[in-house]
Amino acid sequence: MKRFYNEVATQAQGQGWQVTLDGRAIKTAGGNAQRVPSLALAEAMAREWSTQGEEIDPRAFQLRDLADYAIDVASGEARVGLIDEIAAYAGSDTLCYRADPQEPLHARQLEMWEPLLAEAERRYDVHFERVSGIVHRQQPPETMARLQAAVAAQDAFGLAALRMLTSLSASLVIALAALEPEADGDSLWQTANLEEDWQAEHWGSDAEAEEARHARSEAFLLAMRFAALAREGLRA
């Protein structure tokens, strides 16, 4: 598609902000007003439009796509189902499933996973069952309920970010940690990707696997950036 606009700007709209193209406000893919909660996010989305050349590259609108999902899906009737989908990761959180204690991998998991899991237990006043092996073990009902409440407390933009973060990390604990102020995205991604990195260290990797890992890492950091921009400048 050829570029069809000249001027990109942002404007206040109600309690939020919108991107405008030649003075016209953009709508979401679902036809809703594309209103976001912070000026910082609106300006970042505006840059996706302003940096386009003569030909528009749809792949460049990553923040816009997340905003559309937040508005069209996470703000609507699908919100309850989305909360259930995200919270369900707590029932099989990857940080709870360890190698057998005698295996070298177990020591790496303890080093990288246990501090994050213990911090989540303190923050949300919950207890996680740790498992050696792959046999599923139910988490305590109180744990599931409190983490469900933590997910439900997120606004639509937080839910959109959490959905991407949980699917990439297979961990609600990591995803929630990624939304915390001053979260270290690179460190959290290394934690999420520990087992794959372990396999690569011992058995090697190839260019295709490295490319896929990089793409997932970029998506993880994008979701963190989206959530942070959506909160920037807002009152706690």
Image (cartoon, rainbow, N blue to C red):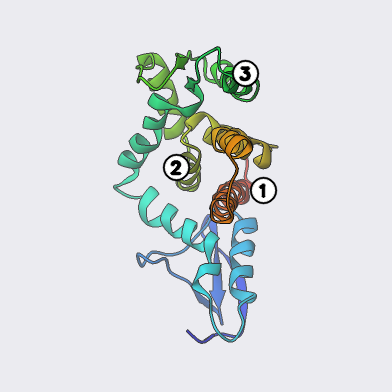
Above or below residue 92? Residue 182 is below
Reading the image, the residue beneath label 3 is 107
Where 20 falls versus 235 (above or below)?
A: below
Where is residue 191 drawn, in percent x and y?
Answer: 60, 33
Of callouts 1 and 3, which one flags the residue occurring earlier in the amino acid sequence? Answer: 3
Q: Which mark is residue 167?
A: 2
The residue that appears at 65% across and 41% down in the rendered structure is 185
Q: Which of 6 and 190 is in front in this view?
A: 190
In primary-sequence order, the first of circles 3 and 2 is 3
Local crowd size for mark 3, using a 10 Å CA cut-off: few (<14), some (14–19), many (≥20): some
Q: Which residue is drawn at 47% across and 39% down?
A: 166
Select label 1 or label 3 by which is in front: 3
| The C terminus, quarter of image | top right
Q: Which of marks 3 and 2 is in front?
A: 3
Q: Which amino acid does label 3 sit on?
A: Ala
Real-space Cα separation, disc 1 to disc 3, in angstroms: 41 Å
Q: Which of marks 1 and 2 is nearer the N terminus?
A: 2
- The kind of residue tagged 1 is Gly
> Could you say whether the residue bearing mark 3 is in a helix, strand or loop?
helix
* Residue 105 visible in the displayed image: yes
**Marks 1 and 2: which is nearer the front?**
2
Q: Where is residue 55 in the image (x, y as percent from the top left)?
A: 55, 84
Which residue occupies the foreground of this view, 176 or 79? Answer: 176
For residue 233, the mark is 1
Classify 10 Å Cα crowding around label 2: few (below 14), some (14-19), many (20 and above): some
